[in-house]
Amino acid sequence: MARVTRLGAAGRVRVAVELDGMPWRTLPAEAVLAAGLSVGLELDRSRARTLARERRRVEARDLAARALRHRDLPAGMLEARLERRGVAPAERRAAVERLERVGVVDDGRYAHARAASVAARGRGDAAVRHDLEQRGLAPGLVDDAISALEPEAARAAALVDRLGGGVRAAQALSRRGFSADSVEAAVGALVAEEPWAELG
């Protein structure tokens, strides 16, 4: 059975492990600590399994944290990203759950921020809903996020002048996912004079 003969720093958070006087692996320091490795210790099968499990756990968490470094992601998208990187299901779920527990991953917060961002780009509730659903967010979170937005009719009214008014504005609003009621309220009497078939 191999014996740990040296543990040396290999960067800020990694440890170079030497077995029987030969370099073996460089591992996350957290995994080395969790497995209880120390110089002179025999690396038996049980401890090797613990070390491998801890290494996978730490690496999954680190991959998840890197994925979140530049932008927020909902849990489902983060899990999918970890899956594409080859992280096993148990480690994926554990990493995401840990990040959820500490508040780094929060689907409700993400849904509200994403809904506001899509609405700010001139999209109606149907377009916002579609975007959030495509990101795997639960229906209740989608509904909450949409209900927190400025009313769709007010958003449509704010866009009418920029879109040129009249039938052209009505068509553009319809394409952007605004409801027929919001379009009609925003464009007003001109819409009532035109057949709705032309607005699709």
Image: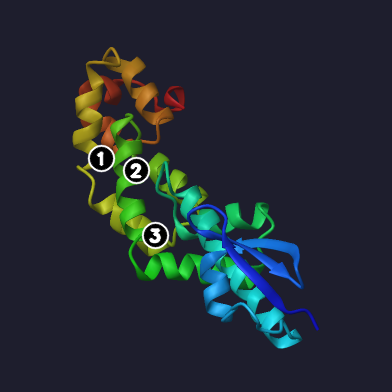
Rendering coords of residue 12 (x, y %): 48, 54
Task: Check disc 1 and give the amino acid type.
Answer: Glu
Rendering coords of residue 107 (x, y %): 38, 59
For the point 57% across and 72% down, the residue is: 32
| Residue 168 in which image quadrant | top left
Task: Check disc 3 and give the amino acid type.
Answer: Val
Seen in the image, is 188 located left or right of residue 74?
left
Residue located beneath label 1 in the image = 152
| Image: 13 above or below 6 | above
Rendering coords of residue 43 (x, y %): 71, 81
| Pointers 2 and 3 in contact (C-beta within 8 Å) | no
| Image: 41 above or below 175 | below
For the point 22% across and 37% down, the residue is: 153
Of badges 1 and 3, nearer the viewer stands 3
Disc 3, SS: loop
Q: Earlier in the sequence, mark 2 or mark 1?
A: 2
| Pointers 2 and 1 in contact (C-beta within 8 Å) | yes
